[in-house]
Amino acid sequence: MTERRDVVIAGGGIIGLALAWELTRRGRHVLVLEASEGSADAAARVAAGMLAPVSEVDLAHPDLTRLSIASAEMYADWAYDLEAASGLDVAYETTGTLIVALHRDHLAEIEHLRAFQHDRGLAAETLTRGELRDAEPALAPSVVGGIRVPDRQIDPRRVLAALRAALARAGAEVCDGARVQRIESGLVTYELDGHTTQVEAMQVVIASGAWSGAIEADVALPMRPVKGLVLRLRGERLLQHVVRTPDVYLVPRAYGELVVGATMEERGFDRTQRAGDVYDLLLEATRALPGVRELELSEVCVGFRPALRDHLPAIGEVAPGVFVATGHFRDGVLLTPVTARLLSAVMCGDAPDPLLAPYAPSRFAAVEVTR
Ligand SMILES: Cc1cc2nc3c(=O)[nH]c(=O)nc-3n(C[C@H](O)[C@H](O)[C@H](O)COP(=O)(O)OP(=O)(O)OC[C@H]3O[C@@H](n4cnc5c(N)ncnc54)[C@H](O)[C@@H]3O)c2cc1C
């Protein structure tokens, strides 16, 4: 007999797991089907974990800034609840972010960013070279100026581990190595250990990141992967803040890790770790923070940002009982709490929050152009 669940989620990345946790807390019996072992392929295994609605405001549509701010405002409580539910530390840090200029072109770029921030009513504090060096003494003497913004950070790998632990404690199931192939009339067909298996569900969610377009279902998602390569370094903690220049970001963790990122590459699902990319990141990192030279290079990793055609997420129902939560591109870690909370509310019968209106998956339905 075919097994049955309230909800099946295709994809155990940060979005799928967080949604599963939210639905489990609302009393739903949830099964997550995850293609890789232990979410090894999830972008959050690679992501830096910057929660950056202010630092990246110049890259975001105004609607996305609203959603991002809403999520950033939920983060402290969400992280606290997750730590309590899992018993694990997720390294949520509130020290803030410095965006620094190493030369005049950088200064002009940062001034442009400040104008965007000002237009959208977001806070930023201008810092002189001396104030920057006081805040972060290890910065390069060549730093010429910058700003401080209240953006925060979290360790996405720890979030994945904590979500899995919280789900296990709450009795939800995560099945690793299960690749969903098709969703049809409440029946989910997936492959596990070389066998084709089926499970029935009242509701099914596609949360398969950059792979979401490969599942056969009543939805056509114009999805592509945008490759990102980051470095993980280890050693003495050199920074208290997240530090960004227009060319590189440096994300310090309390336990001696420094994440340096990231490339943005249109190469499909190519996992090659190119020497030139490692070189470029290290060069830009040492320009901002010379002490990087003394750290151990502990890991080079590649992940895939899920990008829809308009670079905005798709969150909502696509057919009766079939939902999507994908396309979070560069901001999936930041957007996790708001996505999980607002979509779980819709799935439990609440009216959709107006914040979700711009992200209806139906916006990709074919449009006929006539002359
Ligand atoms: C280099 C890099 C740096 C980043 N930095 C940041 C940052 O600082 N801040 C931020 O907010 N965001 C950042 N991001 C973006 C963020 O990581 C992503 O937007 C987010 O993790 C996407 O999560 P997801 O769960 O939607 O997708 P994914 O993480 O891709 O998870 C999807 C999961 O579905 C599984 N899957 C695929 N196909 C199937 C199938 N058919 N059946 C079952 N399972 C399937 C995959 O194995 C995967 O585990 C970064 C991303 C990268 C690559």
Image (spheres, rainbow, N blue to C red):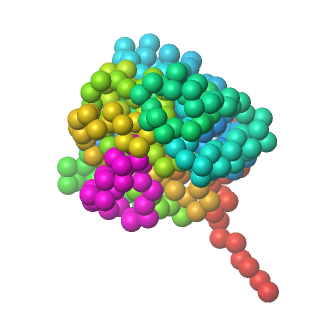
Asked if the magenta segment contains residue 266, the reply would be yes
Q: Is residue 52 visible?
A: no
Q: Position of residue 216 (x, y in %)?
A: 44, 62
- Occupied quadrant, residue 55: top right
Residue 16 relative to residue 68: left or right: left
Q: Position of residue 111 (x, y in %)?
A: 68, 44
Q: Judge whether 93 appears above or below 265 on screen.
A: above
Residue 36 relative to residue 205: left or right: left
Q: Nearer the viewer, residue 275 or 167?
A: 275
Q: Judge whether 188 appears above or below 88 on screen.
A: below
Q: Residue at x 57, y 26 (%)?
A: 130
- Magenta range is 262-285
Q: Judge whether 258 appears above or below 170 on screen.
A: below
Q: Nearer the viewer, residue 186 or 136?
A: 136
Q: Position of residue 290 (x, y in %)?
A: 36, 37
Q: Nearer the viewer, residue 104 or 46?
A: 104
Query: Which quarter of the rendering shows the C terminus?
Result: bottom right
Q: Nearer the viewer, residue 74 or 257?
A: 257
Asked if the magenta segment contains residue 217, the reply would be no
Q: Residue at x 32, y 21 (%)?
A: 255
